[in-house]
């Protein structure tokens, strides 16, 4: 139960941190913000790796993990690349 | 590897994600922020791989390869006008990843996996503490159920949003009963989640959660129309983050919780900004139609005999003598791919000593910040992109406003006509300028389905035709003058 309370504390504080940070992002950068957070939500890759690569798990779990790794990798690679492409355009001037 | 070291590295990754978003608060620091965020992702993935005990790389490498190829092709090929579609797809994939992780975790803990579809529905006898002892087990099961629910509806909802933005799906379909039907659906899905929590071996209930949530995603987004898409995309963005944070609770993984909550709040804040900019509640966007309007306003009555049209070269003469011009872009500019032409017109005006700025309404386009990205692509300096609250007081000192592909966000009825369906929505007060030039194909109404009295005002000139062509002709005429 102790761990659970700690995780919950982390969750709640992260929500407050998110509000403080995001409200300071100017409207001009709202589209890169969305694609950038798409990339960050690709952090599920960490959980996906555990499911896909655990030797000894049933095949079905590994396959579900494979799908998860693929989808999360698209988010990470696609999200960071496209965000970088957009932000470079804002930087030009 | 020591679990403490792993947790510490996850903490560093979380800090890097935070710094990454902090970088996005200024255009100058944004690129570096994005790199820091990517670095955080890299170390989180590496430490996870190093920490895994028995590891089979087959599926991991395959997933990395397929995902990287699809991701890079999407990111490098996508046109800036189509960014809403790209973000919609990424939202969906994020939801899909959380969904599959939760299912994988469910079957791992269950200890049995079905060999056939028929077996998929058979109840399984499970050890009471398979998901953790006491309250911990309950929390794990609730987290699994909710992750599956939110992940699945984000997946299908986003795919529908993509299809609508790509104009693959033109019509709107919804559950009979509208919001009531959706609420019933959601209730049944939640009951199924509760069944799984009470009786983890009830695999049929879990399958029902997946199926119901997939359908709910379809039904929630299908009835929503084009101009409301910014809200839907922002909301689905938030859901994908919440699903990731919930997956963090399933796995007891700190970095998933940190990253997921940051994404979740980001999407929620953007959703709120969009709703405020339309003066509508979230419930109204999701479930309501635009109010049909007490008395229907007859377009002919508004426009009859009062609309003045002009040719691009006449407008060019106006622009030549102007001191200050404001350009107001809308989704029509994106449709016409006219952003580069608009920039060239602005260059031509600036060469003649005209002060040019851009007035950006928060809901212009199909996603938050859509217009800004398009104009940045056309190399418009971001200092010239002025948000609604700052540009509005300047219209009185503006000689010419050029409205290109925007309609409802300039409709003075929102400000002046109490009882109008859009009354109260903040608008760009373009009618306060000395002359308003509206570039538009016809007098057809915008998304709200209302006539726009702006078009019939004495100081408004309508330039009919393709946005890009009209702007190019203005530029040519201006350069020859």
Image (spheres, helix red, strand yellow):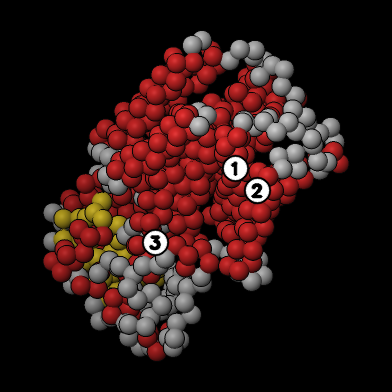
Residue at 36%, 26% (x, y): give it: B16
**Which of the two labelled residues, at mark 2 and mark 1, occupies the earlier sequence position?**
1
Judge the density around disc 1: few (<14), some (14-19), many (≥20) Cα neighbours within 10 Å: many
Q: Nearer the viewer, residue A1 or B23?
A: A1
Circle number at residue B390 = none
Where, by quadrant of the figure, is residue B139 drawn?
top right
Marks 3, 1 in one chain: yes
Q: Secondary structure at mark 2?
A: helix
Q: Secondary structure at mark 3?
A: helix
Q: Dividing the image into 4 quarters, which one contains the C terminus of chain B?
A: bottom left
Q: CA distance from mark 3 to mark 1?
A: 31 Å
Q: Secondary structure at mark 1?
A: helix
Chain bearing tag 2 is B
Tell us which disc is closer to us: 3 or 2. Answer: 2
Residue at 59%, 28% (x, y): give it: A48
Look at mark 1 in the image and give the residue it sits on. Answer: B142
Residue B50 in sight here? yes
Q: CA distance from mark 3 to mark 2?
A: 30 Å
Marks 3 & 1, CB-CB < 8 Å contact: no
Residue A86 in sight here? no
Q: Nearer the viewer, residue B155 or B463?
A: B155
**Which of the two labelled residues, at mark 3 and mark 1, occupies the earlier sequence position?**
1
Marks 2 & 1, CB-CB < 8 Å contact: yes
Marks 2, 1 in one chain: yes
Q: Residue furthest top?
A: B1
Look at mark 2 in the image and give the residue it sits on. Answer: B193
Q: Is residue A84 above or below residue B157?
A: above
**Which of the two labelled residues, at mark 3 and mark 2, occupies the earlier sequence position?**
2
Circle number at residue B275 = 3
């Amino acid at each position: 139960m102790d761990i659970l309370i700690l995780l919950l504390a982390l969750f709640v504080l992260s929500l407050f941190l998110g509000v403080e940070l995001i409200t300071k992002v100017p409207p001009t950068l709202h589209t890169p913000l969305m694609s950038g957070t798409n990339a960050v939500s690709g952090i599920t890759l960490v959980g996906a790796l555990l499911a896909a690569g655990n030797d000894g798990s049933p095949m079905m779990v590994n396959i579900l993990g494979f799908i998860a790794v693929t989808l999360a990798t698209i988010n990470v690679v696609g999200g960071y690349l496209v965000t970088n492409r957009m932000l470079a355009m804002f930087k030009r001037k | 590897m020591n679990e403490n070291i792993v947790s510490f590295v996850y903490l560093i990754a979380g800090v890097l994600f935070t710094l990454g978003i902090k970088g996005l608060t200024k255009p100058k620091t944004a690129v570096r922020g994005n790199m820091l965020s990517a670095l955080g992702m890299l170390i989180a993935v590496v430490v996870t791989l190093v920490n895994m005990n028995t590891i089979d790389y087959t599926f991991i490498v395959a997933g990395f390869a397929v995902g990287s190829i699809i991701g890079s092709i999407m990111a490098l090929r996508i046109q800036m006008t189509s960014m809403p579609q790209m973000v919609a797809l990424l939202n969906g994939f994020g939801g899909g990843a959380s969904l599959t992780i939760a299912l994988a975790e469910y079957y791992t803990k269950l200890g049995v996996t079905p060999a056939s579809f028929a077996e998929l529905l058979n109840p399984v006898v499970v050890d009471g503490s398979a998901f953790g002892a006491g309250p911990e087990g309950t929390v794990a099961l609730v987290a699994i159920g909710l992750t599956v629910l939110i992940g699945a509806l984000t997946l299908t909802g986003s795919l529908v949003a993509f299809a609508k933005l790509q104009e693959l799906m033109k019509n709107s379909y919804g559950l009979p009963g509208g919001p009531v039907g959706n609420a019933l659906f959601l209730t049944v899905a939640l009951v199924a989640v509760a069944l799984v929590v009470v009786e983890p071996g009830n695999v049929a209930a879990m399958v029902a959660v997946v199926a119901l949530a997939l359908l709910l995603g379809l039904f929630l987004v299908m009835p929503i129309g084009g101009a409301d898409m910014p809200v839907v995309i922002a909301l689905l963005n938030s859901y994908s983050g919440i699903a990731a944070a919930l997956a963090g609770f399933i796995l007891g993984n700190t970095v998933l919780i940190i990253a997921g909550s940051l994404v979740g709040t980001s999407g929620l804040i953007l959703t709120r900004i969009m709703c405020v900019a339309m003066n509508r509640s979230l419930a109204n966007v999701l479930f309501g139609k635009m109010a049909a309007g007490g008395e229907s306003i007859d377009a002919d009555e508004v426009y009859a005999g009062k609309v003045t049209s002009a040719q691009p070269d006449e407008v060019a003469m106006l622009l030549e003598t102007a001191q200050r011009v404001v350009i107001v872009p809308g989704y029509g500019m994106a449709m016409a791919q006219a952003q580069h032409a608009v920039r060239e017109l602005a260059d031509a005006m600036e060469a003649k000593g005209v002060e040019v700025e851009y007035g950006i309404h928060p809901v212009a386009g199909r996603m938050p910040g859509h217009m800004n990205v398009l104009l940045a692509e056309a190399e418009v300096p971001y200092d010239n992109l002025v948000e609604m609250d700052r540009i509005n007081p300047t219209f009185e000192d503006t000689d010419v406003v050029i409205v290109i592909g925007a309609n409802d966000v300039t409709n003075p009825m929102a400000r002046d006509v109490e009882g109008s369906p859009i009354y109260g929505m903040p608008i760009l007060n373009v009618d306060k300028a000395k002359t308003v030039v509206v570039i538009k194909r016809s007098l057809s109404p915008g998304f709200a389905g209302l006539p726009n009295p702006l078009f019939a005002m004495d100081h408004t000139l309508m330039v009919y035709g393709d946005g890009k062509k009209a702007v190019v002709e203005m530029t040519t005429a201006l350069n020859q003058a």
